[in-house]
Image (cartoon, rainbow, N blue to C red):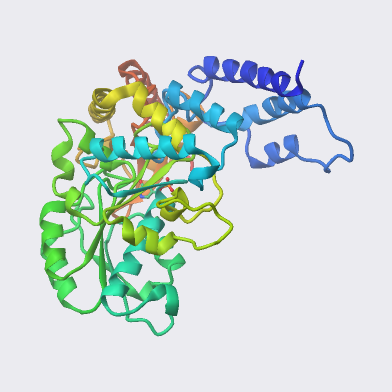
Amino acid sequence: MDDRLAALERAYAHAARFLESVDSRPVWPRSGIDAMTHALGGRLPREGTPSSQVVDELAAAADPGLVGISGARFFGFVIGGALPAALAADWLTSVWDQNAGLTSMSPAAAAAESVAGGWLLELLGLPSGSSVGFVTGGMMANFSCLAAARHAVLTRAGWDVAERGMAGSPRIRLLVGEDRHDTIDRAARYLGLGRENVVPVESDGEGRMLADALAPTLAEGDGPVIVCLQAGEVHTGAFDPCEPLIEIARRHDAWVHVDGAFGLWAAAAASTRHLVAGAQDADSWATDAHKTLNVPYDSGISIVRDPAWSRAAFGVVADYLIAVQDDPFERTPEFSRRARGFPVWAALKSLGADGVGALVERLCANARRMADGLHAIDGVDVVNDVVFTQVVFRCGDDDTTRELGLRVLAEGTCAVTPAAWRGHAVQRCSISSWRTSESDIDASVAAIGEIMAGMHGSRRISH
Ligand SMILES: *Cc1c(COP(=O)(O)O)cnc(C)c1O
């Protein structure tokens, strides 16, 4: 048999076994980094290994160190699963091995991005004609949008950043909510904006930027300014009130960016659309396809209202390129890259607009079910207002809360991840997987309840 097909057949067999077992194996891995390094490690062999055998060895060695992210009861961080059509399209993406940077290097990949991009704008209620870039994730989506923003606000201030760089440029103030995601600060660092120019604006108890705090902070300075809003805070799932905030920002000629890595998808469902009211009036938006949409890693989307600004940030002039207007590389920091449009196209096609809405509604309903279940456990407090897919809880003091989280991971029914919120240890549940059913929520609540009962019973809680 063709060596390629033999290797792929082995991969298919291992994939099938993994998918059939992922919901019944412990969600948290049985092996840590040291054991995994040992299993995969050793010296680079002088001689090669047949492809099929490599696949078998990789599958066997990696298995105990895999996290059950694609299963039904992984609730850590904010991480989606992989819809069947998107997963299969992702395999084909590797088989086809297209370079999606240039239209001429893959009309199919460029068209998939352009069509899926149009669908995304429609679903998310964003202006048609915006530039849509397919990047690795929310981090790079934030970076790409803020690169366009930097170019725009400096141009308006009479400074050509492409020509002159950042040294000596007018100072840009980047106004952010106190509870923005760390990737905003990282993007600001990559862009040379300077940490001292990242200005936090006070937020409320759920992590929403306060409109009353934005106006005075804007008025404290003048010159180029970018206001960075958030749709979906990673702990609480709370949404900045975009409508009043953008109205205030407009009075100061600010560029408004919205980090909606998972929350922008609220626009796709009737019952959550109000959460992002006004967000469509921003200048740029970052979101992920590998979270709420359940496309396999990695898949993020950067959206810029005026394509001229993303082109200004990322356009290239090179005579050897068969340039057509609006090549994909003009919208992203990468040049050669994976054809991420195929799995996004497949996810959207398999769900349809109604299906995406239903998925969002189901994730939110499961989050409420999780919160109700946790609330009913003696000693557990849900500390956030559950408006979307995120549930934050604690049980008694910080040590007990941390200990509970460790025991949940060790028990294996589900995974929640530890965090700090408003100075206290908490555990976070993010209901982001298409796989999660009501019975998965109930089984997880039951497991957490039993662990709690055991901790009360033993009285001595170690940490
Ligand atoms: C997850 C997340 C990010 C970072 O996205 P990646 O896909 O991990 O790069 C940024 N902002 C918010 C609000 C997020 O939830």
* Quadrant of the image occupied by residue 4: top right
* Residue at position x 50%, y 23% in the image: 88
* Quadrant of the image occupied by residue 12: top right
* Residue at position x 27%, y 38% in the image: 265
Q: Position of residue 281 (x, y in %)?
A: 17, 53
Quarter holding the N terminus is top right
Q: Is residue 274 above or below residue 215?
A: above
Q: 271 left or right of 51?
A: left
Q: Is residue 146 above or below residue 293?
A: below
Q: Is residue 338 above or below residue 158?
A: above
Q: Using the image as rendered, state which of residue 446 and residue 201 is in the foreground.
A: 201
Q: Using the image as rendered, state which of residue 98 and residue 348 is in the foreground.
A: 98
Q: Using the image as rendered, state which of residue 445 and residue 64 is in the foreground.
A: 64
Q: 41 left or right of 435?
A: right
Q: Position of residue 227 (x, y in %)?
A: 24, 63
Q: Using the image as rendered, state which of residue 106 and residue 71 is in the foreground.
A: 106
**Residue 182 in view here:** no
* Residue at position x 33%, y 15% in the image: 439
**Residue 70 in view here:** yes
* Residue at position x 59%, y 15% in the image: 17
Give the number of marks.
0
Q: Position of residue 367 (x, y in %)?
A: 27, 30
Give the residue at the far right of this rendering. 46
